[in-house]
Image (tube, rainbow, N blue to C red):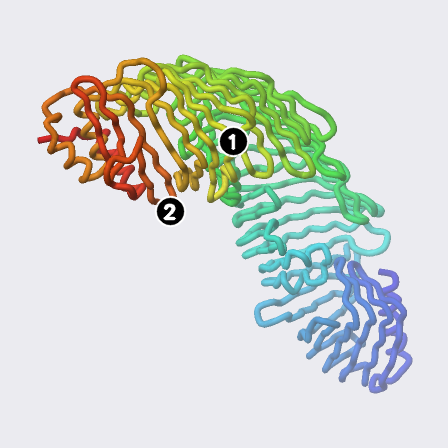
Amino acid sequence: MRRALRGGLACVLIALAVPADAGISLRLARVSAPALMLDDVRIDAARLDGGAARVRAARARFAGRELNDVQLDCADFTVLPVQRCRGGVLRARGFGPWPVEFGVQGKRRTLDARLQIDRGTRIEVGGELAGDRPHLSVKAGALDLSRLLTGVPALQPYAPAGMADLAIELTDIGAGRSPTLHMRVALSAGRLASADALRAAEGVSATVDVEARRTGDDWNGTVALDWQGGELLWDSVYLRGGGTVLSSSFRLSKKTLEVSGATLDLAGAGRLSGDAAFVRAPFGLDTASLHGEGFDLPVLNERFIGPLFAARGWPALELKGSADFAAYADGTGLRGATLRLTDAQVADVAGRFALSGVDAELPWQRDATTSLKLSAGHAQFGRIPADGFELRADLAPDHFALQPARVPLLDAGLRLNALRFDRVDGSWNGDLSADLEPVSMPALTQALGWPRMAGSLGASIPRVSWRNGVLSLDGQMVIQVFDGYVVANGLQVIEPFGAMPRVLAELQMRYIDLEALTETFKFGRVTGRLDGDVAGLELSRWAPVAFDARIRSSEGDYPRTISQRAVESITALGGPGAAAAIQRSFLGFFERFGYRRMGLSCRLRGGVCEMDGLAEKGEGYMLIEGGGVPALSVVGYNRRVDWQELLDRLARVTVTRPVVR
């Protein structure tokens, strides 16, 4: 302020010393005023009481911004009795030209200035530069953020844009005083985007209010943000505006920015409280803490979690209950966090799983291993219900290990012997070992809505590994079903959560009870045992696209009979040719037949199943070789069958009963 008065005094003394119609040329090393500093100033005026004038400054600093090669041209410039510029044009390197007019007059040095940026953007500056309470006010409407923020290095990678209205009041300005700042910024249609699209905002509308007072070199005050609308994506955090209000106290010194008593109201979902400290050169976080209690999970899910999951392509969830949260950070990032759930419900909207009565404490620390605990009163996995269970695990930044646990399923249980994940070279690797206790097939099929099956189903999974997006079975997986078993070897699931999941496997079936199998699927009654091998099985999007399959009667001594209904079903699968051969036979008068052995093979390629049987039989192939009294042999003639047509035939014969005349 003192230098500004000196500059004004110099102009007055010159005006008194020279005639009003004389021209002047003046050069000042620096001119300063509140929030404004000019370096290497030159003033050239044709007259002191009116006429053309030019003011140039090599550099200008205003409100934290710096402009170079600043030039003001006035069509009508006066020094006495008032300092005034009419018909002015202001320009700087990369900015302008902007029409401008201003005047300073009276003992209180009353300032009135107007700057027209473009047709819709006008900046007005007014106030008193002297007197008991010097003050300044700045009002600006429809400021174009893309132009206003061009020179801010930290924002250049995000290409900010939008419109802003600005109102600033500065009181008690000048040397030796403690100025007070009142500022409001109203943002509309705000947007930004990084090149990788991981950080972006769209349609943001918000108001920011700042009140501060300077004491010595420090500013102390409060700030309030009301985010009315729009969307923000920042790395893995997605937020949507509307009822989100932030308020805080702050202290700004030469080296630090301290934020205390901060509160963030999340649109009825709950309130976060916290403190933080930042260093200014270069700007960065020093310490921060954040905590909140009693978050309403349904509202939190609707406003924040759901939109975040949708933006990431993750499954949608239904949440109920409440949650507590705490987090701590320092200059290197997140230091620790804890999430607590109380009587919560977590369900997949698609119906794949649901947990109720969930109580959980999930802590995480950057430099230590923590223990997490989760219990559920009830669960549903697809259509399969589960009773209450508890899970405990060790958690570290690069490690997760579940302690052995049992999840009750129907009348049995799933034993999780080992489940762990480790991060190696930036990628997560996982290993699983589990056993399914024998579960009642009648209870399981009823829960799944399948035809009723007898017996039990059990499975043993010695080790499944997850590496580079591939789920692989190490060793064999054994499934006990229909009083026999199925063994899977070389099982791999590639990109199971991707758009095109693939499955590769080799299967062996041994000693399957045909009576239990055929009665379950209403195929007709067949007694005996069955073996099978499926080589080169490949599924794409969970549907078979290739395999070499062969089924045959098991070795051993056991009853081998087949009902007429089963014969009809088999011939229906073989197509019209095989059916006609049976219809011409007198065996249609019997209800049950004996057989020696049966066998069928299918080589699936390109949507076509190449069929074969036990052996060649004339122009066909033998499916069933007769034995006993009465004996029956069945011959197939269709060598190539469309795979989808074969599935459709199988669906028909397991639902309706063919009539043989």
Category of crowding for the residue at label 1, using alpha-carbon neighbours closer than 10 angstroms: few (below 14), some (14–19), many (at least 20)? some
Residue drawn at the location 58% of the way across and 60% of the way down:
163
Category of crowding for the residue at label 2, using alpha-carbon neighbours closer than 10 angstroms: few (below 14), some (14–19), many (at least 20)? few
Which quarter of the figure is the C terminus placed in?
Answer: top left
Which quarter of the figure is the N terminus placed in?
Answer: bottom right
Q: Where residue 379 sits in the image (x, y, percent)? A: 44, 21
Query: Element at badge 2?
Result: loop
Q: Which mark is residue 490?
A: 1
Residue drawn at the location 57% of the way across and 52% of the way down:
201
Is 513 situated left or right of 493 in this image?
left
Q: Which mark is residue 336?
A: none
Report the residue that reaches farthest toward the front. 618
The quarter of the displayed image where residue 350 is located: top left
Query: Element at badge 1?
Result: strand
- Decide which of 261, 604 is in the foreground and name it: 604
The quarter of the displayed image where residue 525 is located: top left
Q: Is residue 108 above or below residue 349?
A: below
Q: Where residue 334 sits in the image (x, y, percent)? A: 70, 35
- Decide which of 515, 469 is in the foreground and name it: 515
Q: Where residue 610 sits in the image (x, y, percent)? A: 33, 41
Is 447 situated left or right of 99 in this image?
left
The quarter of the displayed image where residue 109 is located: bottom right
Q: Is residue 444 visible?
A: no
Is 256 situated left or right of 164 in this image?
right
Residue drawn at the location 28% of the way across and 41% of the way down:
639
Q: Amino acid at mark 1?
A: Gly
Q: Earlier in the sequence, mark 2 or mark 1?
A: 1
Q: Where residue 197 sits in the image (x, y, percent)? A: 59, 52
Residue drawn at the location 88% of the way across and 63% of the way down:
3
Q: Is residue 173 visible?
A: yes
Q: Is residue 42 above or below residue 163?
A: below
Residue under numbered circle 2: 606
